[in-house]
Amino acid sequence: MSELLKLDTTGNLRDYIPGHPGRSRNSAHRAIGHTLHEKSDRFFQLSSGITVSATDIEIDDKKKKVTVVNESIINGAQTQGEFEFYIKELKEQGEEPEKFHARVEFMVDSDKNSSLMPQLLAIHLPMLRSCL
């Protein structure tokens, strides 16, 4: 999960992300938070997850490493913010978050000037396990 928290959100056009000055949690944030606290084992099924745009994804099978180039969350910044809020809450209580699975979808378009539909890649659980 720590790798998901590092993702940039500059490509996200929305301005209601709680981390931005003057913003606060709304009902969507609270619903995500409730799922994390009460049904984290079903988070993968109950959340639409995070969508990340990138110009490239490099996969090193030998090292079991994925490198995402010029990444930005374009949908799911609320989810990312709630991950951070959830971890902070638990750490303040002296607890560690349980591991859970989250859906992350990558849209890769190496030509930033292209008007073509970006190639859609879903990187599923085996590669995400290192992020959790």
Image (cartoon, rainbow, N blue to C red):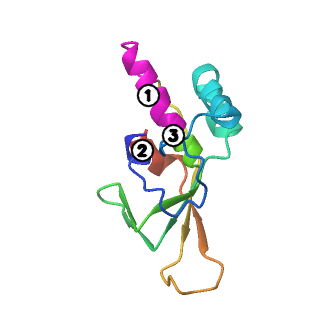
Residue extent of the magenta highlight: 81-97
Question: Is disc 1 placed on a helix, strand or loop?
Answer: helix
Question: Is disc 3 placed on a helix, strand or loop?
Answer: helix
Q: Amino acid at mark 3?
A: Gly
Magenta-span inclusion, residue 91: yes
- Please identify the dominant SS of the magenta region: helix
| Image position of 2 with respect to 9: above or below | above
Q: How many marks?
A: 3
Q: Is residue 102 visible?
A: no
Q: Amino acid at mark 2?
A: Leu
Mark 3: few/some/many CA within 10 Å (<14, 14-19, 20+): some
Question: Is disc 2 placed on a helix, strand or loop?
Answer: helix
- Residue lying farthest to the left in this orientation: 63
Q: Residue 5, labelled with which disc?
A: 2
Q: Residue 81, labelled with which disc?
A: 3
Q: Amino acid at mark 1?
A: Ile
Q: Is residue 104 left or right of residue 60?
A: right
Residue in the image at 43% along x and 28% along y: 87
Q: Give the residue number, with chain letter if any, for mark 1.
A: 87
Front position in the image: 22 or 78 = 22
Residue in the image at 56% along x and 59% along y: 12
Sequence-first disc among 1 and 3:
3
Q: Quadrant of residue 61?
A: bottom left
Do the residues bearing badges 2 and 1 touch, measured as CB atoms within 8 Å? yes
Residue in the image at 64% along x and 29% along y: 30
Whole-angstrom CA distance, mark 2 to mark 3, is 8 Å
